[in-house]
Amino acid sequence: MKIIAYSYCDPLLEPPLDPGVWGWEVDRVYTDLGGRQQLQELLSDCRTEPATYLLIRRWEELGDSVEEVNSHLEELESLGINIITTESEANRKDILQLLREIQYYQRSRRIRQGHARNRLQGKPPPGKVPYGYKRGKNSYAIDRAAASAVKDFFEQFLLYGSLRGAVRYLEKRYGKKISVSTGRRWLTNPVYRGDTAFRDGEIISDTHVAIILREEAAQVDRILRRNRLLPPRTASASRSLAGLVVCGSCHSQMTVTRVSQYRKERKYLYLRARNCPKQPQCKSLHYELVLQETIAAICRDLQGAIGGLQMLDMSQVKSEIQGAIGRQEEILKQLPNLIENGILDAETAAIRAYKLRTEIAELQGRMAELLPVNLRSVAEAVSIPQFWLDLSESERRFYFREFLRQIEIVRKELNTWEVRLIFIF
């Protein structure tokens, strides 16, 4: 008994099939990549020495049209070969069902091949165009009226670090109402950074005009990562200490509470333990006192905490990544010469160029994750008490969350307390 297997893979759509998937009992595996040379060799070998069984994944792999599939099936069956499909439910005896399945898969393959060719050329995928762009001939083009709103949305987020605040600003300033989840997708969408993203997660860089700079995009990513460490809804809170303060005695999150006296306009802010299990409960603290103690602790402890870190040489890391990007770009420049000299055909060169551009996009993403500034120089600036004097609550909120993971209130005897900072690094 002789068992053979045949698979067809289009290099535009899928990687070659692993021969091991058929099992050890298969005597020979025929594999075609784009062409049909191995299929012709299979037919020739079977005319000389017919096999007992032929394993295929789907019926349509035996040809590029219904006529070809039918012709090859008839020839193989005339040689007494039993054909077994591993991924098709259609039965050979049910001709109508078989024809429908073959036509469906071949039509689907033609559509996917068209999309794959567009991808190799850096053209945008099908579907709705992201807000701020319109569909051009070969790439996304800027929609100037909508792009200004998107740009302002990003600037608001970079300024205050608040997603909900940026969403509210967009509705108030431009009348564009979006949900918070849509705003988060905008912030992480590669399209606004000048890149084209596909459904499988692959990204091609520099395919069209960007709305935000890569440096701004890197800052957006850092703020989003920082905000994930905070309790829900505190990223957009109006008070700078919101979401950061924890009671060291009962380990409860402390919330900002506003209190006013009867028939008096003046209002007072307190920090209160939200779910204190103690009886009596931990006392509330004046917000301004905790704020001043936090600023004093930052000025006292920040430089020492950063001094204890073993900082990476960011310039060296960036130069290494830039060197890798430069090498990939040099290979891209050589591809036209390889086509002219007949070393590569146009289709193979297009696939290679696509892979190189996705690797460049990945390297650029790694470089964007690096800190854009020297952390020590920033620490020196914010460790000066005068730095904090003229800052608004929103600005203080930004700097607190740039360095602090948590502010712990350590309670002592006689109703005294002190602030202990837990830094983010």
Image (cartoon, rainbow, N blue to C red):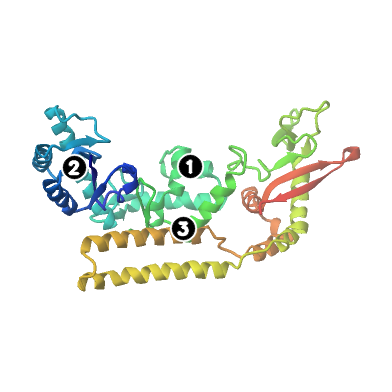
State which quadrant residue 281 falls in. top right
One can see residue 31 in this view:
yes
N-terminal-most mark, 2 or 3: 2
| Left or right placement of residue 313 versus residue 26 in this view | right
For the residue carrying disc 3, how many other residues have a C-alpha within 10 Å: few (<14), some (14-19), or many (20+)? some
Q: Which mark is residue 167?
A: 1
Which residue type carries mark 2? Ala
Q: CA distance from mark 1 to mark 2?
A: 66 Å
Q: Label 3 near label 1: C-beta < 8 Å?
A: no
Q: Which mark is residue 365?
A: 3
N-terminal-most mark, 1 or 3: 1
N-terminal-most mark, 1 or 2: 2
For the residue carrying disc 2, how many other residues have a C-alpha within 10 Å: few (<14), some (14-19), or many (20+)? many
For the residue carrying disc 1, how many other residues have a C-alpha within 10 Å: few (<14), some (14-19), or many (20+)? many
Q: Which mark is residue 51?
A: 2
Which of the pair 154/300 is nearer the observer? 300
